[in-house]
Amino acid sequence: MSDVRGVPATVTVVIPTRGRPRLVVRAVRSALDQTCPPHEVVVVVDGRDPATEQALAGLDPRVVVVPLASSGGAAAARNAGVTRATGDLIAFLDDDDLWLPAKLQRQWAVLAAATDPWNTVVSTAAFWDTGDGATVWPTRSPRPGEPIAEYLFVRDHAGEGLLATPTILLPRTLAAAHPMDPTMRIHEDLDWFLRLEAAGASFVVLPQPLVRVDASSGRQSLSSQSTWSESLAWSVEHRARLGPRAFSGFVLTEAGRAAVRSDAPLGTRTAILRCAMGGRPRPRDVARYLALNAAPSRLRSWVHARRLGSTS
């Protein structure tokens, strides 16, 4: 990669990892094998992990290993990678995910054509692989002027709007000025997107699936394990930043579905609906939530499995 608007631009790939030496080597190779190769791949080992450090040793001169003395979580590891990076652009990748070979090249072309490339975040669609099949999400890009929270949570179907961290490419200056919050246990990626938007960043999502995400049942993020009460408390705290439409959508999907999956009492699920009504919910979202609550637990489990397991 040569330049964006005449400014030399190199790419640093940042990969947080711990305890998965075989997988992280595979992820690193998918980054190194890009049609437009990165300047460097910074692998941040989140806590003591000699096996991973040994697996990465001598792999490629572009691979920089940053071992952390203790585990601080994915957000802290990514921040450490951004701090160590020397490239002009940052691309995030998770240790159990893979990039298709043209990922960086296609994002680069979008960034170079952007009105303000140094305040642009470029994402892509991805294959979400459950082991039984793969679904391509998101199914659309943000509309012009659409707030990022509404893109993510005011949606008609699963996966319509989505930003996955392993698909993100952005300027290092932007990532360094607005690091992820390492103190957050849940929704730290959403919090980061909201702060980037508030700082003036715009988001572009390529519709082509250029990343393969491991969405198997054994792989869950902290956010996916969050309880309904944690998600509800987060949404109430950040209600103003979400906006009334996205607030209601978030409460009904993230908090509401977590409550239904955990078989929370009917009173709890009713309280969640009441909270969502305090924003600006769409009738279809309320109807979908009521239908989900009325469905037998076995049917709910089947529908949840189908949402992740439908093949593309």
Image (cartoon, rainbow, N blue to C red):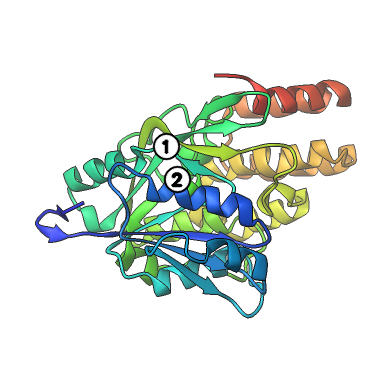
Q: Is residue 192 left or right of residue 61?
A: right
Looking at this view, is 77 or 30 the one in front? Answer: 30
Few, some or many residues within 10 Å of mark 1 (<14, 14–19, 20+): some
x and y percent of residue 132 in the render?
A: 68, 24
Which type of secondary structure does the marked residue at label 1 adopt? loop
* Residue at the (59%, 47%) spot, across then down: 96
Residue 128, numbered label? none
Q: Is residue 45 above or below residue 204?
A: below
- Seen as rendered, the residue at the extreme front is 58
Q: Which residue is mark 1?
A: 100
* Residue at the (57%, 54%) spot, across then down: 24
* Residue at the (52%, 58%) spot, across then down: 191
**Given the image, on which type of amino acid does mark 1 rest?**
Leu
Q: Is residue 57 left or right of residue 293?
A: left
Few, some or many residues within 10 Å of mark 2 (<14, 14–19, 20+): some
Asked if labels 2 and 1 touch by Cβ distance under 8 angstroms, the answer is: yes
**Mark 1 / mark 2, whichever is N-terminal:** 2
Residue 30, numbered label? 2
- Seen as rendered, the residue at the extreme bottom is 69
Which image quarter: residue 288?
A: top right
Asked whether residue 165 appears in the rendered view, the answer is no
* Residue at the (66%, 77%) spot, across then down: 70
Which type of secondary structure does the marked residue at label 2 adopt? helix
**Given the image, on which type of amino acid does mark 2 rest?**
Ser
